[in-house]
Image (cartoon, helix red, strand yellow):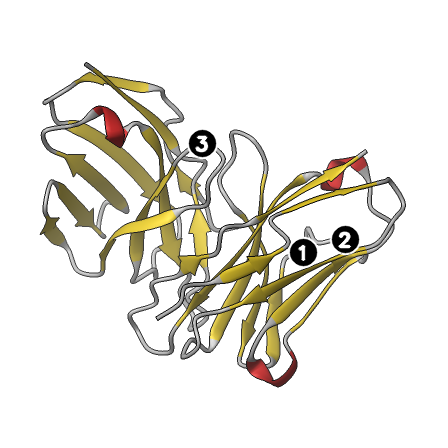
């Protein structure tokens, strides 16, 4: 059973701070990793993908991947109240299907 | 470039009725996924198509659920004899071939079984 683990939170940070979201996974052969943002009542929106060890930056978002530790993280710099949402970690299956398995998500609250 | 489209957006049905949902993926995407999401949980995988072939189906999926993707274009998900426990958001996602397997979601269909 492939598993993706996230702390459900909520994670509460002040406006302007760095929010750090973490995820661990069980499928050692996975090669693709994603972060989605989901606002209440809406569908998930892809915000970051990462395939290689290290950091990948896109605007205020940085994804970090450590395959040896089976660990993925997302940093949000200069957090804004509009970043308040649930952040879902997804891991693509090994073996060629690439089916994304999702964690339960971490709720982020950015307070003014 | 239109995104993934799902229809209907909302469905209220009585227990025991059959319902069918439709998903139109991004046009060049050959992979299509169905997920179910309940409150406080992440999307739970239901089934996966590559072109018209249904290649994987969750072992948790009841026999009351069936999905098709004729001609490798749109897909339908049917739930027969609905139960209250089927109430959830049903999400469709699609992705292209190749190693960059980013999946993009439709707006979802919210099902309420009363």
The residue to which callout 2 is attached is B62
| Residue depicted at x 34% and y 61% | A29
Q: Identify the element where label 2 is drawn.
A: loop
Q: Nearer the viewer, residue B11 or A61?
A: B11
For the residues tagged 2 and 1, is the chain the same? yes
Q: Nearer the viewer, mark 1 or mark 3?
A: 3
The residue to which callout 3 is attached is A40
Mark 2 and mark 1: Cα distance apart in space: 8 Å
Q: Which chain is home to disc 3?
A: A
Q: Are marks 2 and 1 in contact (CB under 8 Å)?
A: no
Please identify the quarter of the rendering in which residue B80 is found.
Answer: bottom right
Q: How many marks?
A: 3
Q: Residues within 10 Å of mark 3 (few under 14, many from 20)?
A: few
Q: Which chain is home to disc 1?
A: B
For the N terminus of chain B, give its image quadrant. bottom left
In the displayed structure, A18 sits above or below A56; it is above
């Amino acid at each position: 059973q492939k598993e993706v683990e996230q702390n459900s939170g909520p994670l509460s940070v002040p406006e302007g701070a760095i929010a750090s979201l973490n995820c661990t996974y069980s499928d050692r052969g996975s090669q693709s990793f994603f972060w989605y943002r989901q606002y209440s009542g809406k569908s998930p929106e892809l915000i970051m993908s990462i395939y290689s060890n290290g950091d990948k930056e896109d605007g205020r978002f940085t994804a970090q991947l450590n395959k040896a530790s089976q660990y993925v993280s997302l940093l949000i710099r200069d957090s804004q109240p509009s970043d308040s949402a649930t952040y879902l970690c997804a891991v693509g299956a090994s073996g060629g299907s690439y089916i994304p398995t999702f964690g339960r998500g971490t709720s982020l609250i950015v307070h003014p | 470039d239109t995104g993934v489209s799902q229809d209907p957006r909302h469905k209220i049905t009585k227990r025991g009725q059959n319902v069918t949902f439709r998903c139109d993926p991004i046009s060049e995407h050959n992979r299509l996924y169905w997920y179910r999401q309940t409150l406080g949980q992440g999307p739970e995988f239901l089934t996966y198509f590559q072109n018209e072939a249904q290649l994987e189906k969750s072992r948790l999926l009841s026999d009351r659920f069936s999905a098709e993707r004729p001609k490798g274009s749109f897909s339908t998900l049917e739930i027969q004899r609905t139960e209250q426990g089927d109430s959830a958001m049903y999400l469709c996602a699609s992705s292209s071939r190749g190693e960059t397997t980013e999946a993009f979601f439709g707006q979802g269909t919210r099902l309420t079984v009363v």
